[in-house]
Image (spheres, grey):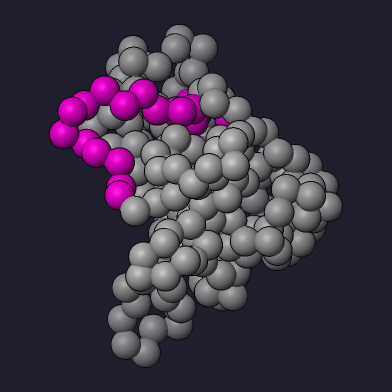
């Protein structure tokens, strides 16, 4: 994709995950959130890739790092799981603007659950519904297609499952036409950055689509 362009500079910061050293000022949590900062031709964007399991830990860590929520330009949700999406409405309210692009696959709000060892919903929670995201200032961009966020940064869109050895996670369920069926996590997307004199950097959430499939799609989309 020639129109992607390239970044002059890229910085990735881990904002939240589950390993925190003893007596650290940072809070750990299940799940993950990254800050992706891209600079291209004088244009700088700060993109949140996932928001972790709860906004308390994420906001604490951002404050500790000196990163004001108001500086966030866009949010990418890599897939529906609660430990990557829960608290997005609270985060949007903290950002405090009405123009925050929220990029995700169109099926991200589907029913998503496990049945073992007991029935449990593990997708986007009711408090982070489509309506509440929009009310909090999020502008949803729900697409299966790759989406350019800025020159040098884009999403993969829905990832083609090409390898035989990368199988979908088992035990995940959804509802289609009133029937409970296996959920293949087709909403799993990733972020691609093209850095001048460096090449491609791929930022994933859980890589449910398979990391080789994701890398192949990044190469195919960019020609790099």
* Image spot of residue 148 (x, y percent): 56, 25
| Nearer to us in this view, 9 or 219 | 219
Q: In this view, does 23 lie to the left or right of 211?
A: right
Q: Give the range drawn in magenta.
A: 149-170
Q: In this view, does 119 lie to the left or right of 63?
A: left
The residue depicted at 45 percent of the width and 9 percent of the height is: 2
Indicate whether 149 appears above or below 38. Answer: above
The quarter of the picture where the C terminus appears is top left
Quarter of the image for residue 199 reads: top left
The majority secondary structure of the magenta stretch comes to: loop
Indicate whether 98 appears above or below 20. Answer: above
| Nearer to us in this view, 160 or 91 | 160
The quarter of the picture where the N terminus appears is top left
Quarter of the image for residue 192 reads: top left
Q: Is residue 114 left or right of residue 171?
A: right
Q: How many marks?
A: 0
Question: Which residue is the extreme one toward the front?
Answer: 179
The residue depicted at 35 percent of the width and 70 percent of the height is: 117
Indicate whether 54 appears above or below 91. Answer: below
* Image spot of residue 216 (x, y percent): 28, 23
The residue depicted at 59 percent of the width and 42 percent of the height is: 178
Can you see residue 160? yes
* Image spot of residue 194 (x, y percent): 39, 27
| Nearer to us in this view, 57 or 188 | 188
């Amino acid at each position: 994709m020639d129109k992607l362009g390239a970044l002059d500079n890229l910085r990735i910061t881990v904002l939240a995950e589950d390993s925190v050293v003893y007596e650290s000022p940072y809070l750990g949590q299940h799940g993950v959130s990254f800050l992706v900062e891209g600079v291209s031709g004088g244009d700088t964007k700060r993109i949140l890739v996932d928001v972790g399991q709860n906004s308390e830990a994420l906001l604490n860590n951002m404050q500790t790092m000196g990163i004001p929520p108001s500086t966030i330009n866009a949010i990418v949700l890599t897939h529906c799981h609660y430990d990557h999406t829960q608290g997005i409405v609270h985060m949007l309210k903290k950002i405090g603007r009405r123009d925050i692009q929220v990029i995700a696959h169109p099926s991200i709000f589907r029913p998503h659950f496990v049945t073992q060892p007991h029935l449990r919903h593990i997708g986007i929670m009711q408090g982070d519904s489509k309506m509440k995201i929009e009310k909090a200032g999020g502008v949803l961009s729900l697409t299966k297609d790759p989406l350019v966020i800025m020159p040098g940064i884009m999403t993969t869109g829905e990832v083609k499952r090409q390898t035989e050895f990368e199988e979908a996670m088992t035990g995940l369920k959804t509802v289609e036409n009133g029937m409970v069926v296996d959920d293949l996590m087709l909403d799993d997307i990733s972020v691609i950055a093209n850095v001048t004199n460096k090449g491609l950097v791929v930022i994933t959430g859980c890589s449910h689509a398979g990391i080789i499939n994701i890398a192949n799609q990044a190469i195919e989309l960019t020609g790099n």
